Amino acid sequence: MEKIGRQVRLPLATAMQISLQGIRIRLGRALVTLSGVVLGIAFLMSVITGEFINAAVKQEREVRNQTTLMSTFVTSEVGAVAGKTLSVAVFGALSAPEQALLAGLAAEHATLRAYGYSGTGVTAVPAGRLGEGSALLLVLGDNPAPGIALGGLMAGMVQPVALDARLRTYPDTPPGRLEHFGIQSAEMLAKAREAERQQGFRTRWIVIISLLVTVIGIANALLMSVTERFKEIGTMKCLGALSGFIRRLFLIESAVIGFVGSFVGLLVGLAFPLLAYGVTFGFPAVFSALDGKRLALSALLCLTAGTALSILAAIYPANFAARMVPASALRSNV
Amino acid sequence: MITPAQLEALFDLRDADDSDYVIRAVDVRKIYRTGEVETHALRGATLDIHRGEYLSIMGPSGSGKTTFFNAIGGLSKPTTGKVYIDQVDIAQLDPYELAWLRCRKVGYIFQAFNLIQVMSCLENVTLPMAFAGMSGEDARDKGMEILSLVGLAERALHKPAEMSGGQQQRVAIARALANSPSIILADEPTANLDLHTGEEIIDLFDRLKAELGVTIVTATHDLKMLKKSDRIVWIEDGLIARVSTPDALDIRVEEIH
Protein backbone atom coordinates (compact mmCIF):
# COMPACT_ATOMS: atom_id res chain seq x y z
CA MET A 1 0.00 0.00 0.00
CA GLU A 2 1.27 3.41 -0.89
CA LYS A 3 1.60 5.70 2.09
CA ILE A 4 -0.65 8.73 2.11
CA GLY A 5 1.44 11.81 1.56
CA ARG A 6 0.78 15.45 2.31
CA GLN A 7 -0.07 17.79 -0.51
CA VAL A 8 2.78 20.22 -1.10
CA ARG A 9 2.30 23.97 -1.14
CA LEU A 10 2.76 25.15 -4.67
CA PRO A 11 5.35 27.85 -5.34
CA LEU A 12 3.99 31.38 -5.58
CA ALA A 13 5.05 31.48 -9.23
CA THR A 14 2.49 28.80 -10.15
CA ALA A 15 -0.33 30.65 -8.42
CA MET A 16 0.87 33.86 -10.04
CA GLN A 17 0.84 32.25 -13.47
CA ILE A 18 -2.67 30.80 -13.10
CA SER A 19 -3.92 34.07 -11.63
CA LEU A 20 -2.51 36.19 -14.44
CA GLN A 21 -3.91 33.80 -17.00
CA GLY A 22 -7.32 34.16 -15.38
CA ILE A 23 -7.09 37.95 -15.54
CA ARG A 24 -6.02 37.86 -19.18
CA ILE A 25 -8.89 35.63 -20.22
CA ARG A 26 -11.55 37.39 -18.14
CA LEU A 27 -10.18 40.78 -19.12
CA GLY A 28 -13.62 42.40 -19.29
CA ARG A 29 -14.42 41.63 -15.67
CA ALA A 30 -10.92 42.55 -14.57
CA LEU A 31 -11.27 45.90 -16.31
CA VAL A 32 -14.49 46.67 -14.45
CA THR A 33 -12.78 45.98 -11.13
CA LEU A 34 -9.76 47.90 -12.34
CA SER A 35 -11.77 50.98 -13.23
CA GLY A 36 -12.99 51.15 -9.63
CA VAL A 37 -9.42 51.25 -8.39
CA VAL A 38 -8.47 53.77 -11.07
CA LEU A 39 -11.25 56.14 -9.99
CA GLY A 40 -10.48 55.86 -6.29
CA ILE A 41 -6.74 56.35 -6.67
CA ALA A 42 -7.16 59.06 -9.33
CA PHE A 43 -9.25 61.00 -6.83
CA LEU A 44 -6.68 60.53 -4.08
CA MET A 45 -3.82 61.57 -6.35
CA SER A 46 -5.68 64.56 -7.77
CA VAL A 47 -6.46 65.80 -4.28
CA ILE A 48 -2.80 65.50 -3.26
CA THR A 49 -1.47 67.11 -6.47
CA GLY A 50 -4.15 69.79 -6.37
CA GLU A 51 -3.17 70.68 -2.83
CA PHE A 52 0.49 71.01 -3.81
CA ILE A 53 -0.19 73.26 -6.73
CA ASN A 54 -2.79 75.25 -4.88
CA ALA A 55 -0.51 75.85 -1.91
CA ALA A 56 2.41 76.85 -4.13
CA VAL A 57 0.35 79.15 -6.33
CA LYS A 58 -1.40 80.65 -3.33
CA GLN A 59 1.87 81.39 -1.57
CA GLU A 60 3.28 83.07 -4.64
CA ARG A 61 0.16 85.24 -4.89
CA GLU A 62 0.34 86.09 -1.21
CA VAL A 63 3.90 87.31 -1.62
CA ARG A 64 2.93 89.41 -4.61
CA ASN A 65 -0.05 90.93 -2.80
CA GLN A 66 2.01 91.77 0.27
CA THR A 67 4.74 93.31 -1.87
CA THR A 68 2.24 95.44 -3.75
CA LEU A 69 0.66 96.55 -0.48
CA MET A 70 4.00 97.61 0.97
CA SER A 71 5.20 99.44 -2.14
CA THR A 72 1.86 101.28 -2.25
CA PHE A 73 2.55 102.45 1.31
CA VAL A 74 5.97 103.63 0.31
CA THR A 75 4.73 105.57 -2.74
CA SER A 76 1.92 107.14 -0.73
CA GLU A 77 4.55 108.49 1.70
CA VAL A 78 7.16 109.74 -0.74
CA GLY A 79 5.60 109.69 -4.20
CA ALA A 80 7.67 108.27 -7.04
CA VAL A 81 10.75 106.64 -5.55
CA ALA A 82 13.12 107.24 -8.49
CA GLY A 83 16.10 109.30 -7.31
CA LYS A 84 14.85 109.45 -3.71
CA THR A 85 17.05 108.37 -0.86
CA LEU A 86 15.47 105.78 1.38
CA SER A 87 17.03 104.15 4.41
CA VAL A 88 16.42 100.57 5.41
CA ALA A 89 17.08 99.00 8.77
CA VAL A 90 16.95 95.20 8.80
CA PHE A 91 16.68 93.24 12.03
CA GLY A 92 16.70 89.48 11.60
CA ALA A 93 15.78 87.62 8.42
CA LEU A 94 13.81 89.20 5.58
CA SER A 95 10.50 87.69 4.53
CA ALA A 96 9.81 86.95 0.85
CA PRO A 97 7.61 90.07 0.34
CA GLU A 98 10.22 92.26 2.06
CA GLN A 99 12.94 90.95 -0.26
CA ALA A 100 10.67 91.53 -3.25
CA LEU A 101 9.98 95.07 -1.99
CA LEU A 102 13.70 95.94 -1.74
CA ALA A 103 14.39 94.43 -5.17
CA GLY A 104 11.48 96.45 -6.57
CA LEU A 105 12.67 99.73 -5.04
CA ALA A 106 16.20 99.18 -6.35
CA ALA A 107 14.80 98.47 -9.79
CA GLU A 108 12.90 101.78 -9.69
CA HIS A 109 16.21 103.61 -9.10
CA ALA A 110 15.72 104.62 -5.48
CA THR A 111 18.96 105.19 -3.59
CA LEU A 112 18.94 102.69 -0.78
CA ARG A 113 21.05 103.12 2.34
CA ALA A 114 20.89 100.13 4.60
CA TYR A 115 21.86 99.07 8.06
CA GLY A 116 22.13 95.33 8.72
CA TYR A 117 21.70 94.46 5.08
CA SER A 118 23.75 94.43 1.90
CA GLY A 119 22.81 93.67 -1.66
CA THR A 120 23.04 94.94 -5.21
CA GLY A 121 22.08 98.61 -5.46
CA VAL A 122 22.20 99.03 -1.70
CA THR A 123 24.79 101.06 0.21
CA ALA A 124 25.59 99.69 3.64
CA VAL A 125 26.02 102.40 6.27
CA PRO A 126 26.58 102.36 10.06
CA ALA A 127 23.55 102.80 12.32
CA GLY A 128 24.43 106.37 13.32
CA ARG A 129 24.50 107.62 9.71
CA LEU A 130 21.50 105.76 8.38
CA GLY A 131 19.09 108.65 8.40
CA GLU A 132 21.32 111.23 6.62
CA GLY A 133 19.34 112.87 3.83
CA SER A 134 16.73 110.15 3.58
CA ALA A 135 13.04 110.71 3.07
CA LEU A 136 11.76 107.52 4.67
CA LEU A 137 12.98 104.80 6.99
CA LEU A 138 11.83 101.23 6.37
CA VAL A 139 12.26 98.85 9.29
CA LEU A 140 12.24 95.23 8.07
CA GLY A 141 13.11 91.72 9.30
CA ASP A 142 11.59 89.22 11.70
CA ASN A 143 13.21 90.34 14.95
CA PRO A 144 10.36 91.81 17.04
CA ALA A 145 12.57 93.60 19.61
CA PRO A 146 15.93 94.67 18.13
CA GLY A 147 16.86 96.77 21.16
CA ILE A 148 18.03 99.73 19.08
CA ALA A 149 16.64 103.22 19.62
CA LEU A 150 14.67 104.61 16.66
CA GLY A 151 15.97 108.07 17.49
CA GLY A 152 19.49 107.09 16.47
CA LEU A 153 18.34 105.50 13.24
CA MET A 154 16.16 108.42 12.22
CA ALA A 155 18.68 111.15 13.03
CA GLY A 156 19.32 113.48 10.08
CA MET A 157 16.27 112.48 8.02
CA VAL A 158 14.66 115.00 5.69
CA GLN A 159 11.31 113.90 7.04
CA PRO A 160 11.31 111.88 10.24
CA VAL A 161 8.90 109.14 8.97
CA ALA A 162 9.42 105.43 9.65
CA LEU A 163 7.45 102.50 8.20
CA ASP A 164 7.70 99.29 10.20
CA ALA A 165 6.75 95.96 8.65
CA ARG A 166 6.13 94.47 12.07
CA LEU A 167 4.67 95.56 15.37
CA ARG A 168 8.10 96.05 16.93
CA THR A 169 8.96 97.41 20.35
CA TYR A 170 11.71 100.03 20.75
CA PRO A 171 13.46 101.32 23.86
CA ASP A 172 12.59 104.94 23.00
CA THR A 173 9.73 107.01 21.67
CA PRO A 174 10.16 107.60 17.93
CA PRO A 175 11.24 111.14 17.14
CA GLY A 176 8.89 111.43 14.16
CA ARG A 177 5.93 109.53 12.72
CA LEU A 178 5.96 105.71 13.03
CA GLU A 179 3.54 103.73 10.86
CA HIS A 180 3.09 99.99 10.31
CA PHE A 181 2.69 98.67 6.82
CA GLY A 182 1.78 95.43 5.09
CA ILE A 183 0.74 93.74 8.27
CA GLN A 184 -2.06 91.22 8.57
CA SER A 185 -3.56 91.15 12.00
CA ALA A 186 -3.05 88.01 14.07
CA GLU A 187 -6.81 87.52 14.16
CA MET A 188 -7.07 87.51 10.37
CA LEU A 189 -4.17 85.09 10.07
CA ALA A 190 -5.77 82.74 12.59
CA LYS A 191 -9.07 82.89 10.76
CA ALA A 192 -7.44 82.04 7.45
CA ARG A 193 -5.53 79.19 9.04
CA GLU A 194 -8.71 77.81 10.64
CA ALA A 195 -10.56 77.94 7.31
CA GLU A 196 -7.69 76.10 5.69
CA ARG A 197 -7.70 73.47 8.42
CA GLN A 198 -11.45 72.93 8.01
CA GLN A 199 -11.08 72.63 4.26
CA GLY A 200 -8.27 70.08 4.66
CA PHE A 201 -10.37 68.08 7.11
CA ARG A 202 -13.31 68.02 4.72
CA THR A 203 -11.09 66.95 1.81
CA ARG A 204 -9.49 64.15 3.82
CA TRP A 205 -12.92 62.91 4.83
CA ILE A 206 -14.12 62.80 1.22
CA VAL A 207 -10.94 60.98 0.18
CA ILE A 208 -11.42 58.38 2.92
CA ILE A 209 -15.05 57.85 1.93
CA SER A 210 -14.13 57.49 -1.74
CA LEU A 211 -11.43 54.92 -0.90
CA LEU A 212 -13.93 52.99 1.24
CA VAL A 213 -16.35 52.96 -1.67
CA THR A 214 -13.53 51.67 -3.86
CA VAL A 215 -12.77 48.86 -1.41
CA ILE A 216 -16.42 47.84 -1.24
CA GLY A 217 -16.62 47.96 -5.03
CA ILE A 218 -13.63 45.68 -5.43
CA ALA A 219 -14.92 43.27 -2.78
CA ASN A 220 -18.29 43.16 -4.52
CA ALA A 221 -16.75 42.52 -7.94
CA LEU A 222 -14.54 39.77 -6.52
CA LEU A 223 -17.45 38.13 -4.71
CA MET A 224 -19.31 38.04 -8.03
CA SER A 225 -16.23 36.57 -9.63
CA VAL A 226 -16.04 33.88 -6.93
CA THR A 227 -19.69 32.98 -7.39
CA GLU A 228 -19.16 32.77 -11.13
CA ARG A 229 -16.23 30.45 -10.62
CA PHE A 230 -17.91 28.18 -8.07
CA LYS A 231 -17.54 25.16 -10.29
CA GLU A 232 -14.04 26.02 -11.36
CA ILE A 233 -12.91 26.35 -7.74
CA GLY A 234 -14.61 23.08 -6.77
CA THR A 235 -12.98 21.37 -9.72
CA MET A 236 -9.55 22.66 -8.74
CA LYS A 237 -10.13 21.32 -5.24
CA CYS A 238 -11.11 17.95 -6.69
CA LEU A 239 -7.87 17.97 -8.63
CA GLY A 240 -5.90 18.47 -5.44
CA ALA A 241 -5.73 22.23 -4.86
CA LEU A 242 -5.30 23.26 -1.23
CA SER A 243 -7.58 25.92 0.25
CA GLY A 244 -4.55 28.14 0.68
CA PHE A 245 -3.83 27.91 -3.03
CA ILE A 246 -7.35 29.02 -3.94
CA ARG A 247 -7.10 31.87 -1.45
CA ARG A 248 -3.80 32.93 -2.96
CA LEU A 249 -5.23 32.91 -6.49
CA PHE A 250 -7.79 35.54 -5.55
CA LEU A 251 -5.42 37.61 -3.44
CA ILE A 252 -2.88 37.72 -6.26
CA GLU A 253 -5.55 38.57 -8.79
CA SER A 254 -6.74 41.47 -6.65
CA ALA A 255 -3.21 42.66 -5.90
CA VAL A 256 -2.34 42.75 -9.59
CA ILE A 257 -5.54 44.58 -10.46
CA GLY A 258 -4.93 46.96 -7.55
CA PHE A 259 -1.37 47.70 -8.61
CA VAL A 260 -2.18 48.29 -12.28
CA GLY A 261 -5.29 50.28 -11.36
CA SER A 262 -3.34 52.46 -8.92
CA PHE A 263 -0.70 53.12 -11.54
CA VAL A 264 -3.24 54.23 -14.13
CA GLY A 265 -5.14 56.10 -11.41
CA LEU A 266 -2.15 58.09 -10.28
CA LEU A 267 -1.34 59.12 -13.84
CA VAL A 268 -4.92 60.31 -14.34
CA GLY A 269 -4.92 61.94 -10.90
CA LEU A 270 -1.71 63.79 -11.79
CA ALA A 271 -2.73 64.88 -15.28
CA PHE A 272 -6.15 66.21 -14.36
CA PRO A 273 -5.20 68.89 -11.77
CA LEU A 274 -2.15 69.84 -13.84
CA LEU A 275 -4.45 70.57 -16.74
CA ALA A 276 -7.08 72.35 -14.65
CA TYR A 277 -4.64 74.57 -12.70
CA GLY A 278 -2.52 75.03 -15.82
CA VAL A 279 -5.46 76.57 -17.65
CA THR A 280 -6.25 78.83 -14.68
CA PHE A 281 -2.79 79.97 -13.54
CA GLY A 282 -0.67 79.27 -16.62
CA PHE A 283 1.37 76.14 -17.19
CA PRO A 284 4.84 77.55 -16.30
CA ALA A 285 3.61 78.62 -12.85
CA VAL A 286 2.02 75.23 -12.23
CA PHE A 287 5.03 73.21 -13.42
CA SER A 288 7.44 75.30 -11.36
CA ALA A 289 5.22 74.60 -8.34
CA LEU A 290 5.72 70.82 -8.72
CA ASP A 291 8.23 69.28 -6.40
CA GLY A 292 9.77 66.04 -7.72
CA LYS A 293 10.45 64.49 -4.36
CA ARG A 294 7.01 65.15 -2.92
CA LEU A 295 5.46 63.99 -6.18
CA ALA A 296 7.39 60.70 -6.06
CA LEU A 297 6.35 60.23 -2.46
CA SER A 298 2.67 60.76 -3.24
CA ALA A 299 2.93 58.41 -6.23
CA LEU A 300 4.39 55.78 -3.91
CA LEU A 301 1.62 56.44 -1.41
CA CYS A 302 -1.02 55.97 -4.12
CA LEU A 303 0.53 52.73 -5.39
CA THR A 304 0.85 51.33 -1.88
CA ALA A 305 -2.63 52.43 -0.83
CA GLY A 306 -4.25 51.09 -4.02
CA THR A 307 -2.54 47.72 -3.83
CA ALA A 308 -3.04 47.34 -0.09
CA LEU A 309 -6.72 48.30 -0.26
CA SER A 310 -7.28 45.86 -3.14
CA ILE A 311 -5.72 43.04 -1.13
CA LEU A 312 -7.79 44.10 1.88
CA ALA A 313 -10.94 44.00 -0.24
CA ALA A 314 -10.02 40.51 -1.50
CA ILE A 315 -9.65 38.92 1.92
CA TYR A 316 -13.30 38.10 2.41
CA PRO A 317 -13.99 36.87 -1.17
CA ALA A 318 -10.75 34.84 -1.14
CA ASN A 319 -11.67 33.15 2.14
CA PHE A 320 -15.16 32.55 0.82
CA ALA A 321 -13.68 30.81 -2.21
CA ALA A 322 -11.17 28.85 -0.15
CA ARG A 323 -13.88 27.50 2.15
CA MET A 324 -15.83 26.06 -0.76
CA VAL A 325 -16.20 22.28 -0.59
CA PRO A 326 -14.88 20.25 -3.53
CA ALA A 327 -18.25 18.55 -3.93
CA SER A 328 -19.64 21.85 -5.21
CA ALA A 329 -17.92 21.00 -8.50
CA LEU A 330 -20.47 18.23 -9.00
CA ARG A 331 -23.40 20.59 -8.97
CA SER A 332 -24.27 21.05 -12.59
CA ASN A 333 -26.81 23.83 -12.05
CA VAL A 334 -24.32 26.55 -11.18
CA MET B 1 -1.28 5.68 -31.15
CA ILE B 2 0.36 4.85 -27.88
CA THR B 3 2.25 1.59 -27.40
CA PRO B 4 1.67 -0.79 -24.46
CA ALA B 5 5.25 -0.18 -23.30
CA GLN B 6 4.59 3.55 -23.14
CA LEU B 7 1.37 2.88 -21.31
CA GLU B 8 3.18 0.85 -18.75
CA ALA B 9 5.75 3.56 -18.23
CA LEU B 10 2.98 6.13 -17.98
CA PHE B 11 0.81 4.46 -15.46
CA ASP B 12 3.19 2.14 -13.69
CA LEU B 13 0.68 -0.68 -14.14
CA ARG B 14 0.42 -2.02 -10.67
CA ASP B 15 0.64 -5.58 -9.51
CA ALA B 16 -2.23 -6.96 -7.55
CA ASP B 17 -2.11 -5.15 -4.23
CA ASP B 18 -2.26 -6.89 -0.90
CA SER B 19 -5.87 -5.82 -0.78
CA ASP B 20 -8.46 -6.70 -3.36
CA TYR B 21 -10.63 -3.79 -2.37
CA VAL B 22 -9.77 -0.33 -3.53
CA ILE B 23 -12.70 1.30 -1.75
CA ARG B 24 -14.52 0.00 1.31
CA ALA B 25 -17.49 1.78 2.79
CA VAL B 26 -18.58 0.47 6.18
CA ASP B 27 -21.91 1.52 7.68
CA VAL B 28 -21.64 5.04 6.22
CA ARG B 29 -24.15 7.49 7.65
CA LYS B 30 -24.44 11.11 6.73
CA ILE B 31 -26.65 13.62 8.46
CA TYR B 32 -27.11 17.14 7.14
CA ARG B 33 -28.29 19.70 9.64
CA THR B 34 -30.15 22.76 8.48
CA GLY B 35 -31.04 24.68 11.60
CA GLU B 36 -33.26 22.37 13.64
CA VAL B 37 -33.97 19.97 10.79
CA GLU B 38 -31.85 16.84 10.40
CA THR B 39 -31.72 15.10 7.06
CA HIS B 40 -30.45 11.54 7.03
CA ALA B 41 -28.98 11.30 3.56
CA LEU B 42 -27.27 7.99 4.21
CA ARG B 43 -28.48 5.56 6.84
CA GLY B 44 -25.80 2.90 6.98
CA ALA B 45 -24.45 2.07 3.51
CA THR B 46 -21.85 -0.70 3.30
CA LEU B 47 -20.07 -1.60 0.07
CA ASP B 48 -16.73 -3.06 -1.04
CA ILE B 49 -15.39 -2.14 -4.44
CA HIS B 50 -12.85 -4.45 -6.06
CA ARG B 51 -9.67 -3.25 -7.64
CA GLY B 52 -10.17 -2.91 -11.37
CA GLU B 53 -13.93 -3.10 -11.10
CA TYR B 54 -16.38 -1.10 -13.22
CA LEU B 55 -19.16 -0.19 -10.85
CA SER B 56 -22.27 1.84 -11.52
CA ILE B 57 -24.38 3.50 -8.86
CA MET B 58 -28.07 4.10 -9.54
CA GLY B 59 -30.81 5.65 -7.55
CA PRO B 60 -33.61 8.17 -7.79
CA SER B 61 -32.84 11.77 -6.91
CA GLY B 62 -32.85 12.33 -3.16
CA SER B 63 -31.93 8.70 -2.53
CA GLY B 64 -28.50 9.63 -1.15
CA LYS B 65 -26.74 8.57 -4.33
CA THR B 66 -24.73 11.78 -4.63
CA THR B 67 -23.87 11.75 -0.94
CA PHE B 68 -22.62 8.19 -1.19
CA PHE B 69 -20.70 9.03 -4.33
CA ASN B 70 -19.04 12.02 -2.60
CA ALA B 71 -18.22 9.94 0.47
CA ILE B 72 -16.46 7.12 -1.39
CA GLY B 73 -14.64 9.65 -3.55
CA GLY B 74 -13.14 11.49 -0.61
CA LEU B 75 -15.09 14.63 -1.39
CA SER B 76 -16.87 14.70 1.96
CA LYS B 77 -16.44 12.90 5.23
CA PRO B 78 -19.28 10.69 6.57
CA THR B 79 -20.94 11.64 9.86
CA THR B 80 -20.35 8.13 11.18
CA GLY B 81 -19.01 4.98 9.60
CA LYS B 82 -15.76 4.48 7.75
CA VAL B 83 -14.62 4.96 4.19
CA TYR B 84 -11.32 3.37 3.24
CA ILE B 85 -9.65 4.36 0.01
CA ASP B 86 -6.72 2.07 -0.65
CA GLN B 87 -7.04 0.92 2.96
CA VAL B 88 -6.72 4.43 4.36
CA ASP B 89 -9.54 5.70 6.55
CA ILE B 90 -10.26 9.09 5.02
CA ALA B 91 -11.80 10.38 8.26
CA GLN B 92 -8.32 10.34 9.76
CA LEU B 93 -6.84 12.59 7.11
CA ASP B 94 -6.07 16.27 7.57
CA PRO B 95 -6.80 18.74 4.74
CA TYR B 96 -3.29 18.39 3.30
CA GLU B 97 -3.56 14.60 3.15
CA LEU B 98 -7.08 14.76 1.74
CA ALA B 99 -5.89 17.07 -1.01
CA TRP B 100 -3.02 14.69 -1.70
CA LEU B 101 -5.46 11.79 -1.94
CA ARG B 102 -7.80 13.67 -4.28
CA CYS B 103 -4.82 14.66 -6.37
CA ARG B 104 -3.19 11.25 -6.81
CA LYS B 105 -5.57 8.46 -5.86
CA VAL B 106 -8.81 9.61 -7.44
CA GLY B 107 -9.58 11.03 -10.85
CA TYR B 108 -12.88 12.92 -11.07
CA ILE B 109 -15.05 13.20 -14.14
CA PHE B 110 -18.09 15.43 -14.11
CA GLN B 111 -21.40 15.58 -15.89
CA ALA B 112 -20.67 19.10 -17.17
CA PHE B 113 -17.01 18.26 -17.94
CA ASN B 114 -15.83 21.07 -15.64
CA LEU B 115 -12.82 21.95 -17.71
CA ILE B 116 -11.17 25.19 -16.69
CA GLN B 117 -12.38 27.39 -19.53
CA VAL B 118 -9.47 29.80 -19.40
CA MET B 119 -6.92 27.04 -19.94
CA SER B 120 -6.02 25.04 -23.04
CA CYS B 121 -6.65 21.29 -23.12
CA LEU B 122 -3.03 20.58 -22.33
CA GLU B 123 -3.05 23.03 -19.43
CA ASN B 124 -6.19 21.39 -18.09
CA VAL B 125 -4.45 18.03 -18.18
CA THR B 126 -1.23 19.29 -16.62
CA LEU B 127 -3.00 21.21 -13.82
CA PRO B 128 -3.35 18.15 -11.53
CA MET B 129 0.30 17.40 -12.25
CA ALA B 130 1.21 20.91 -11.10
CA PHE B 131 -0.76 20.27 -7.91
CA ALA B 132 1.27 17.06 -7.52
CA GLY B 133 4.47 19.06 -7.86
CA MET B 134 5.30 18.12 -11.45
CA SER B 135 5.82 20.92 -13.94
CA GLY B 136 7.70 22.06 -17.02
CA GLU B 137 8.77 19.70 -19.77
CA ASP B 138 7.95 16.51 -17.84
CA ALA B 139 4.37 17.55 -17.25
CA ARG B 140 3.96 18.70 -20.84
CA ASP B 141 5.29 15.43 -22.25
CA LYS B 142 3.11 13.34 -19.97
CA GLY B 143 0.12 15.54 -20.74
CA MET B 144 0.63 15.08 -24.47
CA GLU B 145 0.91 11.31 -24.06
CA ILE B 146 -2.32 11.13 -22.12
CA LEU B 147 -4.06 13.40 -24.64
CA SER B 148 -2.95 11.08 -27.44
CA LEU B 149 -4.32 8.18 -25.38
CA VAL B 150 -7.77 9.78 -25.59
CA GLY B 151 -7.10 10.69 -29.24
CA LEU B 152 -6.88 14.48 -28.84
CA ALA B 153 -3.16 15.19 -29.13
CA GLU B 154 -3.68 17.46 -32.13
CA ARG B 155 -6.21 19.61 -30.20
CA ALA B 156 -3.86 20.10 -27.23
CA LEU B 157 -3.62 23.86 -27.54
CA HIS B 158 -7.31 24.50 -28.15
CA LYS B 159 -9.56 25.98 -25.51
CA PRO B 160 -12.43 23.80 -24.22
CA ALA B 161 -14.99 26.20 -25.70
CA GLU B 162 -13.68 25.41 -29.17
CA MET B 163 -14.43 21.70 -28.84
CA SER B 164 -17.47 19.45 -28.98
CA GLY B 165 -19.01 17.95 -25.84
CA GLY B 166 -17.55 14.52 -26.51
CA GLN B 167 -14.10 15.98 -27.05
CA GLN B 168 -14.38 18.02 -23.86
CA GLN B 169 -15.32 14.95 -21.90
CA ARG B 170 -12.34 13.11 -23.36
CA VAL B 171 -10.08 15.97 -22.20
CA ALA B 172 -11.72 15.69 -18.78
CA ILE B 173 -10.94 11.95 -18.75
CA ALA B 174 -7.34 12.71 -19.73
CA ARG B 175 -7.20 15.20 -16.85
CA ALA B 176 -8.58 12.59 -14.46
CA LEU B 177 -5.78 10.24 -15.55
CA ALA B 178 -3.06 12.86 -15.09
CA ASN B 179 -1.63 11.55 -11.83
CA SER B 180 -2.25 7.86 -12.61
CA PRO B 181 -5.05 7.40 -10.09
CA SER B 182 -6.26 3.98 -8.94
CA ILE B 183 -9.89 5.13 -9.00
CA ILE B 184 -11.86 7.06 -11.60
CA LEU B 185 -15.01 8.61 -10.19
CA ALA B 186 -17.46 9.71 -12.85
CA ASP B 187 -20.69 11.58 -12.11
CA GLU B 188 -23.16 11.01 -14.98
CA PRO B 189 -20.35 11.31 -17.53
CA THR B 190 -22.60 10.76 -20.55
CA ALA B 191 -25.65 12.74 -19.43
CA ASN B 192 -24.66 15.88 -21.36
CA LEU B 193 -23.68 13.99 -24.52
CA ASP B 194 -25.63 12.66 -27.47
CA LEU B 195 -25.98 8.92 -27.97
CA HIS B 196 -23.05 8.52 -30.29
CA THR B 197 -20.48 10.52 -28.35
CA GLY B 198 -21.78 8.91 -25.18
CA GLU B 199 -20.82 5.55 -26.66
CA GLU B 200 -17.36 6.84 -27.46
CA ILE B 201 -16.88 7.76 -23.83
CA ILE B 202 -18.18 4.39 -22.68
CA ASP B 203 -15.73 2.63 -25.02
CA LEU B 204 -12.93 4.78 -23.65
CA PHE B 205 -13.85 3.77 -20.09
CA ASP B 206 -13.83 0.16 -21.24
CA ARG B 207 -10.34 0.55 -22.63
CA LEU B 208 -9.05 2.30 -19.51
CA LYS B 209 -10.39 -0.51 -17.38
CA ALA B 210 -8.91 -3.22 -19.61
CA GLU B 211 -5.58 -1.57 -20.37
CA LEU B 212 -4.81 0.35 -17.19
CA GLY B 213 -6.67 -1.70 -14.63
CA VAL B 214 -8.25 1.47 -13.23
CA THR B 215 -11.24 1.08 -10.94
CA ILE B 216 -14.17 3.02 -12.39
CA VAL B 217 -17.12 4.13 -10.29
CA THR B 218 -19.90 5.99 -12.06
CA ALA B 219 -23.20 7.42 -11.03
CA THR B 220 -25.32 6.97 -14.12
CA HIS B 221 -28.70 6.21 -15.63
CA ASP B 222 -27.27 5.47 -19.07
CA LEU B 223 -28.37 1.96 -20.03
CA LYS B 224 -25.38 1.40 -22.30
CA MET B 225 -23.09 2.30 -19.47
CA LEU B 226 -24.95 0.09 -17.04
CA LYS B 227 -24.64 -2.84 -19.40
CA LYS B 228 -20.86 -2.52 -19.49
CA SER B 229 -20.57 -2.43 -15.69
CA ASP B 230 -19.37 -5.34 -13.62
CA ARG B 231 -21.85 -4.55 -10.89
CA ILE B 232 -24.72 -2.13 -10.42
CA VAL B 233 -25.49 -0.70 -7.02
CA TRP B 234 -29.02 0.53 -6.29
CA ILE B 235 -29.38 3.14 -3.61
CA GLU B 236 -32.78 3.88 -2.19
CA ASP B 237 -33.69 5.94 0.82
CA GLY B 238 -30.13 6.24 2.12
CA LEU B 239 -29.47 2.49 1.99
CA ILE B 240 -27.98 0.14 -0.55
CA ALA B 241 -31.12 -1.62 -1.72
CA ARG B 242 -29.46 -4.21 -3.91
CA VAL B 243 -26.35 -5.01 -5.90
CA SER B 244 -26.95 -6.69 -9.22
CA THR B 245 -25.23 -7.56 -12.48
CA PRO B 246 -26.08 -6.10 -15.88
CA ASP B 247 -27.73 -9.40 -16.87
CA ALA B 248 -30.31 -8.96 -14.17
CA LEU B 249 -30.79 -5.41 -15.40
CA ASP B 250 -31.61 -6.59 -18.92
CA ILE B 251 -34.47 -8.67 -17.59
CA ARG B 252 -35.82 -5.73 -15.67
CA VAL B 253 -35.63 -3.50 -18.70
CA GLU B 254 -37.57 -6.02 -20.73
CA GLU B 255 -40.13 -6.23 -17.98
CA ILE B 256 -40.68 -2.53 -18.24
CA HIS B 257 -41.13 -2.60 -21.98
Image (tube, grey):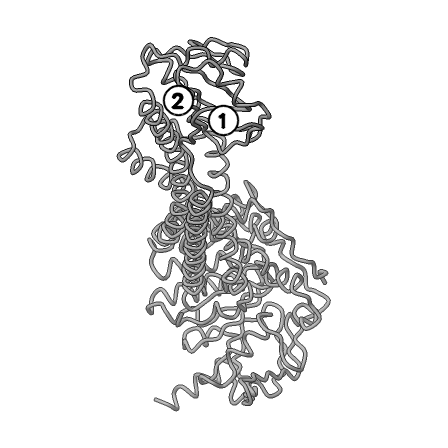
- Judged left or right of residue A326, residue B169 is left
**Residue A112 falls in image quadrant:** top left
Q: Nearer the viewer, residue A123 or A297?
A: A123
To which residue does mark 2 refer?
Answer: A101
SS class, disc 2? helix
In the rendered image, is residue B79 in sight?
A: yes
Left or right of residue A58: residue A151 = right
Q: Chain of mark 1?
A: A
Residue A174, label in figure: 1
Q: SS for tag 1? A: loop
Whether tag 2 and tag 1 are in contact, CB under 8 A, the answer is no
| Count of numbered badges drawn on the protein | 2
Q: From the top left corner, tell me how far across and down residue B197 is, in percent.
A: 36, 64
Mark 2, Cα crowd under 10 Å, few <14 / some 14-19 / many 20+, is many
N-terminal-most mark, 2 or 1: 2
Image height of B71 relative to A149, above or below: below
Say which chain tag 2 marks.
Answer: A
The kind of residue on which mark 2 rests is Leu
Q: Position of residue A97 (x, y in %)?
A: 42, 26
Q: CA distance from mark 2 to mark 1?
A: 24 Å
Kind of residue sitting beneath label 1: Pro
Q: Residue at x 34, y 55 (%)?
A: B161
Residue A322, percent from left and from top: 55, 62
- In this view of the protein, which residue sits in the foreground, B118 or B255? B118
Q: Residue at x 49, y 34 (%)?
A: A167
| In-front residue for pair B134/A144 | A144
